[in-house]
Amino acid sequence: MPLHLATFIRRPASVRQACALAVLVVLIAAAPAASARTTEHHRHPHFHAMRNMLSDIGLPGMGIISDDDVPEDGQKYEIKLARQGGEIIDVIYRVGDTYIPEALGKLSQFLRDSHNDEVKSYDPRTFDVLHTMLAKLNRSSSVIEVLCGYRTKETNDALRESRTTNAAEHSQHIEGNALDLRVPGIPAVELRDAALSLGAGGVGYYPKSQFIHVDTGPVREWTSAPHRALHTRHRRHA
């Protein structure tokens, strides 16, 4: 067969191979994104349904901590917290873009370590997360029941040794930017979804005890499964 004819015959095959390779590359590139969407929807079908029901409210911009007089104009950010034992605080901690130092001090005092009364200045963005979470649920005036606020490292280590809680070794509670909480009348799963929609830090969900954890640390999420259920599944698998 003449050389020019053999070259002509092979060329269409090369074109077909190139096209097939291009299609394969596109499919491989698209697969991870499709897989991620499918996985996300599978993991949180309730969250995706709930997200569409939340008010379209976002976190306020970072305020400026100032020792000046409280501004006369601007949106007022109020927060109500309660502790076991009946202690309650109701305070406006921010007006417009200005945090109120005195109010932040009162909130930090309120969230002191309940085991030794030590106080740590709280990250003010933590209160923005709480305020916005309730606003998304149209429950801005609700009282937040605080189960745990600040923990010293000593308290955190003692809780870890007792094995009565899920206290992490490097808990955000030690940093003064985390709370474990409930809100009467609002299911914990709805609080979780509202907090997750902010994308502002860590969100933990504890369905058995019906409370959530929020913090302003790295963005992440987790659900605590009852130990008994885990043990049951392990036995069945064995």
Image: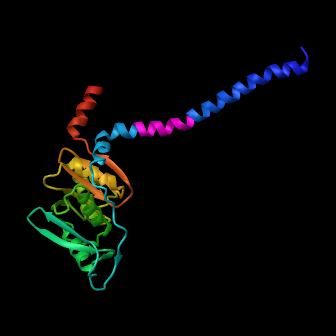
Q: At 8% from the left edge and 64% from the top edge, which residue is drawn?
A: 85
Quarter occupied by the N terminus: top right
Residue at far left of view: 86
Residue at far top of view: 1
- The magenta-colored residue range is 28-38
Residue 40: x percent and y percent? 38, 41
Q: At 65% from the left edge and 30% from the top edge, which residue is drawn?
A: 21
Residue 92: x percent and y percent? 21, 73
Quarter occupied by the C terminus: top left
Residue at far right of view: 2
Q: At 23% from the left edge and 49% from the top edge, which residue is drawn?
A: 190
When the figure is inspected, residue 71 is found, relative to residue 127, above or below; the finding is below
Residue 89: x percent and y percent? 15, 70
Q: Give the image quarter of residue 3.
A: top right
The main secondary structure of the magenta stretch is helix
When the figure is inspected, residue 9 is found, relative to residue 119, above or below; the finding is above
Residue 30: x percent and y percent? 53, 37
Q: Give the image quarter of residue 58.
A: bottom left
Along the viewing direction, whichever of 2 and 169 lies nearer the viewer:
2
Please give left or right for residue 104 compared with residue 198 in the image.
left
Residue at far bottom of view: 68
Q: Give the image quarter of residue 144.
A: bottom left
Along the viewing direction, whichever of 149 and 193 lies nearer the viewer:
193
**Residue 164 appears in view:** no
When the figure is inspected, residue 73 is found, relative to residue 48, above or below; the finding is below
Please give left or right for residue 15 compared with residue 233 in the image.
right
Q: How many marks?
A: 0
Residue 20 inside the magenta-drawn segment: no
**Residue 17 appears in view:** yes
The color scheme shown is: rainbow
